[in-house]
Amino acid sequence: MIKEVSGDILLSKAQAIAHGLAPNDHFDQGLALSLRKNYPSMYKDFRHYYRIAHPAPGKAWIWSGVGGVRIINLLTQEPAKGNNSHPGKASLPNVNHALKELVKIIKKEKITSLALPKLATGVGGLPWEEVKPIIYDRLSKLNIPVYIYSTYRKGIKAQEN
């Protein structure tokens, strides 16, 4: 079941939160920045993972924190061209491949609910009208609640039920 909601994704009761970013991302914009502030160890672990694995766009990496927090990092954007530059834009093939990886992670980890933003449309730069059908195609087959935070409202808890 997919349900679009309005609110602050960081207040979600979903078992996992997924979001898009780039390989070697600095987590300095959008939802990634909020996640970095709330979970600084996730950012450090992602940097370590990146240095060791050198993941390509289209991959996904899950982080589990204290208290059962799970963040699934979807590599939807192209990497930055240099150390001090911002990541590149997202692409529909990267989104599609990352969502395939997300489905595998959800099944393997037995995740029971998921929250995600309008993936790859903010910093990633893609039109929601093009991303939304891919999300619905990939995630509607899951037998879990999926909450798409289509409107951000800081500090407001969404009606997920």
Image (cartoon, helix red, strand yellow):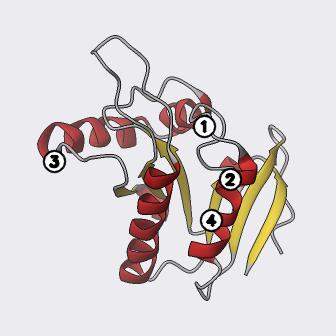
Element under disc 4? helix
Q: Which residue is mark 1?
A: 31
Between the residue at mark 4 and the residue at mark 2, the CA separation in whole angstroms equals: 10 Å
Q: Which residue is mark 2?
A: 130
Nearer to us: label 4 or label 2: 2
Marked residue nearer the N-terminal end (1 or 4) = 1
Residue 24 in which image quadrant: top left
Instruction: Pinpoint residue 39: horizontal percent, then vertical percent.
Output: 47, 40
| Label pair 1/4, CB-CB below 8 angstroms | no
Q: Which residue is mark 3?
A: 53
Instruction: Pinpoint residue 10: horizontal percent, then vertical percent.
Output: 66, 48
Residue occupying the far bottom of the picture: 143
Marked residue nearer the N-terminal end (4 or 2) = 2
Q: Which residue is mark 4?
A: 135
Between the residue at mark 1 and the residue at mark 2, the CA separation in whole angstroms equals: 20 Å
Marked residue nearer the N-terminal end (3 or 2) = 3
Nearer to us: label 3 or label 1: 3
Residue drawn 38% across and 31% down?
25
Nearer to us: label 1 or label 4: 4
